[in-house]
Image (cartoon, rainbow, N blue to C red):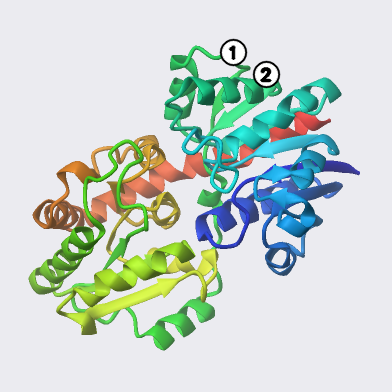
Amino acid sequence: MKTITILGNNSGRNAGDNAILGNLLHDFSLECSNILFKIPTINTQFIRKEFGDYNVLPIGMMPWNFAIRNLGWPLYRAMTKTDMVLITDNILFDRKLNNPLVNNLKSISLFSGLCKKKGIPIVFYNSSIGPINSAAGAKALQKVLDASPLVITRDKHTKKLIEDLCLRHPEIIVNADSALNTQAPSNSRIKEIIEHETLFKAPGGTIGLNVNAYIDNWNQTGTLSRNDFCKLIAATADRLIESLDVDILFTVTQIMDIKITQECVQNIRNKDRIGVLDNRKYSYQELAALLGMVEVHAGLRTHTLIFCAAQGTPMISINAYPKSVAFLETIGMGKWNIDLKTLTSESLTEIIKRAYEQRGSLRQHILEAVEPEMEKARKSVRLTLDLLK
């Protein structure tokens, strides 16, 4: 039996990260059953509960496991006692590079040399990279790339970043995020949620919003205060409700965003027209399916945009991460984004209204654009297995 170590944000707190892991395991299971997946995590119980149907071995990353989150004995063992290491999602950046509570890049780079020496390939699996803004960050990334015979990224921006930094690298293949292949639950389950939460009752339909605790781009810190941002989102919601006769559905895919979502809702006048769904209560499959039922969605978290794309829902990126813009460009929706530095209630309302008016044609465009991206995500499994064999 072969062993693959999966590195990512696998704590269970983020529905997008859960979708990456769940779809990765599902896609691999369709091609090969003789693999044990080692999954470093701060929440071993979550991995067993949610993904126990697959051949998984959760590896604890807590202090009693001799780890300081991303640094320590568990990561060393997971990377050096395996047949392959997969790096997923967007965990390689140089923000707080020397803080293992936040940063993965430094810790992974420390053990990459041993992987290379032992012939353990490190594969970038439908991942994104960046930002990398320091020489130390670029040096750490180079160490990881030196142990990698294959880079499969989910966006062109990552390829360009590696090339612009003039780093040595193997072949770079641009495929797609495995979360695009998220399967919706049964119709009966979705109907049950809709009735329980009293959703989708407004004459004009429902518009989705998503906010997160990082209200500014890493490179534009201080653009908006938290209070001003919440008031801006609230004013936008009221404008949309009153002009389009719609309801508003806030979708929370990261537990840390619940508080700021509540702060936004507190500032809204039309509270009776507001719904809130979060990933403490609902799975990533359920959230994705419900996002498929809104008319238009505008959000900061990249995976709310990916879930929308998987369901054909027109989406707008409120740009907090480079990977969000990169994803929209991949599916031909590059113009449907708005930067935080130019964000106002008026500008956000205007772009949402434009998407709402064009939602029929946008939905058709998205469904056509996403279908080949879904196949690209599946293709990554076969490329990886060829290397493993």
Kindly identify the residue that appears in the image at 59 percent across and 13 percent down: 168
Indicate the quadrant where residue 249 lies: bottom left
Instruction: Residue type at mark 2: give it.
Output: Asp
Please name the residue that numbered disc 1 is placed on.
168
Kindly identify the residue that appears in the image at 32 percent across and 42 percent down: 217
Q: Is residue 250 visible?
A: no
Does the residue at mark 2 contact the one at mark 1 (Cβ under 8 Å)?
yes
> Which element type, helix, strand or loop, lies under badge 2?
helix
| Front-most of residues 134 and 303 | 134
Kindly identify the residue that appears in the image at 77 percent across and 51 percent down: 66
Q: Is residue 272 above or below residue 309?
A: below
> Which element type, helix, strand or loop, lies under badge 1?
loop
Kindly identify the residue that appears in the image at 72 percent across and 50 percent down: 67
| The N terminus sits in image quarter | top right
Please name the residue that numbered disc 2 is placed on.
146
119 relative position to 238: left or right: right
Q: Is residue 317 above or below residue 197?
A: above
Q: Position of residue 283 (x, y in %)?
A: 55, 69
Q: Position of residue 4 (x, y in %)?
A: 78, 42
Q: Is residue 72 above or below residue 312?
A: above
| Front-most of residues 361 and 23 | 23
Instruction: Residue type at mark 1: give it.
Output: Arg
